[in-house]
């Protein structure tokens, strides 16, 4: 629980609405799970911690 509290981490549900957003994304990235991460970032207005430049091509904020 130390890191959870330290960084104020929270769980984000992967629901049908997020899955639909991910499925509707253009295939800029070949990995479907990365598109799910993008969809979560879009719907939750989160920054994605990644060094993968393709993720940023979807218009989400990235940090690395």
Image (cartoon, helix red, strand yellow):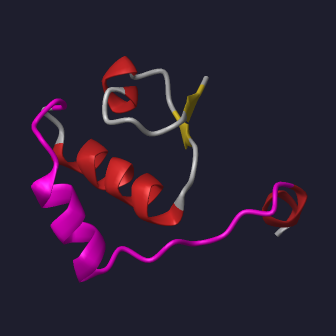
Q: Main secondary structure of the magenta part?
A: loop
In this orientation, which residue lies closer to the viewer: 62 or 33?
A: 62
In this orientation, which residue lies closer to the viewer: 2 or 55?
A: 55
Identified at 35% across, 31% down, the residue is 55
Q: Is residue 36 left or right of residue 52?
A: left
Image spot of residue 63 (x, y percent): 61, 29
In this orientation, which residue lies closer to the viewer: 43 or 48?
A: 43
Image spot of residue 59 (x, y percent): 39, 35
Identified at 42% across, 64% down, the residue is 43
Position of the N terminus by quadrant:
bottom right
Residue at far front of view: 59
In the rendered image of this protein, does residue 9 appear above or below residue 34? below
Image spot of residue 10 (x, y percent): 66, 70
In this orientation, which residue lies closer to the viewer: 2 or 61?
A: 61
Quarter residue 18 falls in: bottom left
Identified at 16% across, 30% down, the residue is 28
Total of numbered circles in the picture?
0
Quarter residue 30 falls in: top left
Q: Which residues are magenta?
A: 7-29
Image spot of residue 52 (x, y percent): 39, 22
Magenta stretch: includes residue 24: yes
Position of the C terminus by quadrant:
top right
Q: Is residue 10 left or right of residue 41?
A: right
Identified at 11% across, 41% down, the residue is 26
Magenta stretch: includes residue 26: yes
In the rendered image of this protein, does residue 41 appear above or below residue 21? above
Quarter residue 29 falls in: top left
């Amino acid at each position: 629980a130390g890191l959870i509290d330290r960084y104020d981490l929270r769980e984000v549900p992967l629901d049908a609405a997020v899955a639909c957003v991910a499925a509707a994304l253009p295939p800029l990235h070949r990995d479907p799970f990365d598109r799910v991460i993008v969809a979560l970032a879009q719907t939750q207005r989160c920054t994605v911690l990644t060094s993968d430049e393709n993720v940023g091509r979807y218009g989400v904020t990235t940090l690395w």
